[in-house]
Image (cartoon, rainbow, N blue to C red):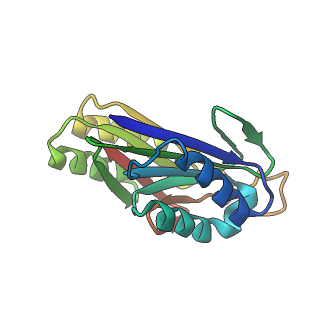
């Protein structure tokens, strides 16, 4: 049986926010081990992203941690837009298998599709990518050409709302301890 939990914090201190959101999310699992975690944070916390990802990996005891930066985050409890926010979803269960995918380059969709075919199972795919340095439509077309009709959901990472913000429109995506600005990360769920 699949178990899940979601947590949220709008604290301006990124490390406090990730601890609070993760603690709230973990309550939904009871004593079920975490198979995958999804961490989303607003651009306010991008400077702490690596440390925040480490906290989640260490607490949930899996490298299957996926996420990206955004202008806003949401859970069933709250939505943050252009203000500090952290959202966490944890999943666990007897029959859930998670394969982590990290690719970069114009052929990211092809390589993801090939990895999906190699699995040889019925899957669903979460993809998170940078819309500045990648082409989301082309990536999805490449995946469909290789892997066929597979359910795909995901998002395009965003950063500081340039030109309104004072920094560049840098974005972040992560999969495990890999954190990048130009990649496509995926969670293949079986």
Q: Relative to 109, is 171 above or below? A: below
- Residue 123, percent from left and from top: 27, 37
Left or right of 69, for residue 119: left
Which one is in front, 55 or 101? 55
- Residue 133, percent from left and from top: 54, 55
Q: Residue at x 56, y 44 (%)?
A: 156
Q: Is residue 43 visible?
A: yes
Left or right of 156, for residue 97: left
Which one is in front, 86 or 175? 86
Left or right of 84, for residue 8: left
- Residue 38, percent from left and from top: 51, 49
Q: Is residue 157 visible?
A: no
- Residue 10, percent from left and from top: 77, 49
**Quarter containing the C terminus:** top left
Q: Residue at x 39, y 62 (%)?
A: 62
Q: Quadrant of residue 139?
A: top left
**Quarter containing the N terminus:** top left
Q: Residue at x 55, y 62 (%)?
A: 181
Q: Relative to 48, is 130 above or below? A: above
């Amino acid at each position: 049986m699949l178990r899940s939990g979601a947590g949220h914090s709008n604290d301006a201190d990124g490390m406090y926010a990730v601890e609070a959101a993760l603690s709230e999310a973990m309550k939904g699992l009871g004593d079920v081990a975490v198979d995958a975690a999804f961490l989303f944070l607003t651009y306010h916390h991008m400077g702490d992203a690596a440390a925040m990802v480490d906290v989640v990996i260490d607490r949930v005891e899996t490298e299957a941690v996926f996420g990206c930066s955004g202008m806003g985050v949401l859970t069933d409890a709250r939505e943050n837009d252009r203000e500090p926010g952290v959202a966490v979803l944890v999943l666990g269960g007897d029959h859930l298998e998670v394969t982590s995918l990290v690719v970069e380059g114009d052929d990211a969709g092809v390589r993801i599709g090939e990895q999906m075919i190699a699995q040889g199972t019925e899957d669903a795919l979460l993809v998170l990518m940078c819309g500045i340095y990648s082409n989301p439509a082309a990536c999805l077309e490449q995946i469909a050409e290789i892997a066929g009709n597979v359910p795909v959901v995901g998002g395009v990472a965003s950063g500081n709302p340039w030109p309104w913000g004072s920094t560049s429109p840098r974005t972040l995506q992560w999969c495990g301890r890999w954190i990048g600005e130009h990649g496509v990360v995926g969670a293949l769920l079986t």
